[in-house]
Image (cartoon, grey):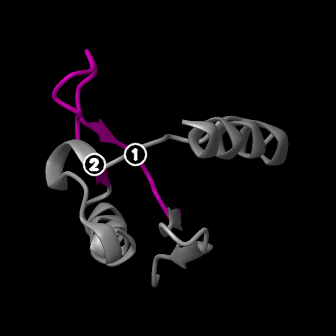
Amino acid sequence: MLGDRAESAAIHKVFETLPILYNNKWKYGHTLGASGALSVMDAVQILMTQTVPSIPYLSQDSISAKIDTVMVNATGFGGGTFSLILKRNQ
């Protein structure tokens, strides 16, 4: 939870306008070392389809939008973190 709060605070500090946020833990559960790779896979799918899927426990529909850039944040149990920015090939 502390890491989630820190990530949220950093996103609010860096971005003037809050971006569309998405998580996939509801879909995959705790995947340990595979979470970063699965998040990148989902990010590529979002770029390809131009759609952010709905999250079942939230009352929002899928979001269709012009999406050119996606950022993936991932953290490992050892404390290692990474942020990867993917840009759509025009």
Q: Nearer the viewer, residue 76 or 38?
A: 76
**Residue 69 covered by magenta stretch:** yes
**Is 66 left or right of 24, judged from the image as shown?**
right
Amino acid type at image mark 1? Ala
Mark yes or no: residue 69 visible: no
Mark yes or no: residue 14 visible: yes
Q: Farthest residue toward the bottom? A: 89
The residue depicted at 59 percent of the width and 42 percent of the height is 19
Q: Which mark is residue 25?
A: 2
Amino acid type at image mark 2? Lys
Q: Please, is residue 90 above or below residue 11 in the view?
A: below
Residue at label 1?
Answer: 65
- Asked where in the image residue 50 lies, by quadrant, the reply is bottom left
Q: Residues within 10 Å of mark 2 (few under 14, many from 20)?
A: few
**Is 29 left or right of 37, judged from the image as shown?**
left
Q: Please, is residue 74 above or below residue 66 in the view?
A: below
The residue depicted at 54 percent of the width and 72 percent of the height is 78
Q: Residues within 10 Å of mark 1 (few under 14, many from 20)?
A: few
- Asked where in the image residue 12 lies, by quadrant, the reply is top right
Q: Nearer the viewer, residue 65 or 7?
A: 7
Q: Nearer the viewer, residue 87 or 38?
A: 38
Query: Measured from the top left, where is residue 29 in percent x and y?
Result: 20, 51
The residue depicted at 63 percent of the width and 38 percent of the height is 2
Between marks 2 and 1, how big is the CA–CA gap? 22 Å
Image: magenta residue range: 51-71
Q: Which mark is residue 17?
A: none
